[in-house]
Amino acid sequence: MAGREYPPGAEAFIRGVNAFVFLEDEPFQADVILTPGNANPCHAIRAAALYRQGYAPWVLPSGRYTKEVGGFRGADPAYQADYPGPYETEWAFLRAVLMREGVPDKAILREDTATFTWENAQHSRDVTDALGLKVRRAILCCHSYHARRALLYYQAAFPEADFRVCPAAISGFSREDWHLTAEGRMRILGEVRRLGDQVQDVFAMMLEQKFLLNR
């Protein structure tokens, strides 16, 4: 923020949002790398790099498609030349990204039913339980502006696991530049609002499903 002029109090506001939304840790040796669904490949590319460096033996991408859309429309336009598809699900797209980046198919676990972030977390837990994979340490690869919400949901699904968040920053929506454009402000402040809107519904679902009590 150096060299830019803001109204009084704006820098403190920006720092507060940054501290809440954007999380980033150093990676550690883990049981699995977890990635929520998306049409942008950047977080899967980050996951693949960590896999190649030997941080985990498994990568578990998750996602069917966004519930509101009702189908997976393929990679974001900027990446369609590299990933033309077609892909039926976010998982199939992320699998293609991981394999292109050097992750062997045998190391990629499958979760292709989730339609929003809490389902990404919950259904990923179902996959690891079904495989008998005990997750004590996990790396979460998501987009940097999605880090807080993704971590809260994945921690709820894997309450006994220690997490490190290793996100991928996207230009225009990073902690350094989100506040410079109307689109960036809408996206990042939307994350703050979305967490407030969703947490009551997600917590109610957890209790209804007795998800927390059954783990």
Image: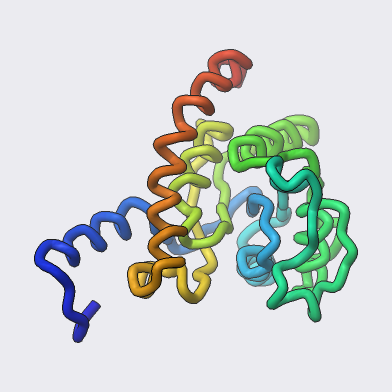
Query: Could you say which is closer to the camera, residue 23 or residue 93?
Result: 93
Asked where in the image residue 196 lies, by quadrant, the reply is top left
Query: Could you say which is closer to the camera, residue 147 or residue 72?
Result: 72
Query: Could you say which is closer to the camera, residue 160 or residue 206?
Result: 206
**Where's residue 119, x and y in %?**
65, 36
In the rendered structure, the answer to whether residue 92 lies left or right of residue 187 reads right
Location of residue 59 with respect to 76 vertically, above or below: above
Asked where in the image residue 121 lies, by quadrant, the reply is top right
**Where's residue 54, x and y in %?**
65, 66
Query: From where the camera sits, is residue 48 visible?
Result: yes
Location of residue 202 with respect to 19 vertically, above or below: above
In the rendered structure, the answer to whether residue 45 lies left or right of residue 181 reads right
**Where's residue 2, x and y in %?**
20, 82
Query: From where the camera sits, is residue 23 visible?
Result: no
Task: Please identify the quadrant where the N terminus is shown.
Answer: bottom left
In the rendered structure, the answer to whether residue 172 lies left or right of residue 110 reads left
**Where's residue 56, x and y in %?**
65, 57
- Residue drawn at x 17%, y 61% is 12
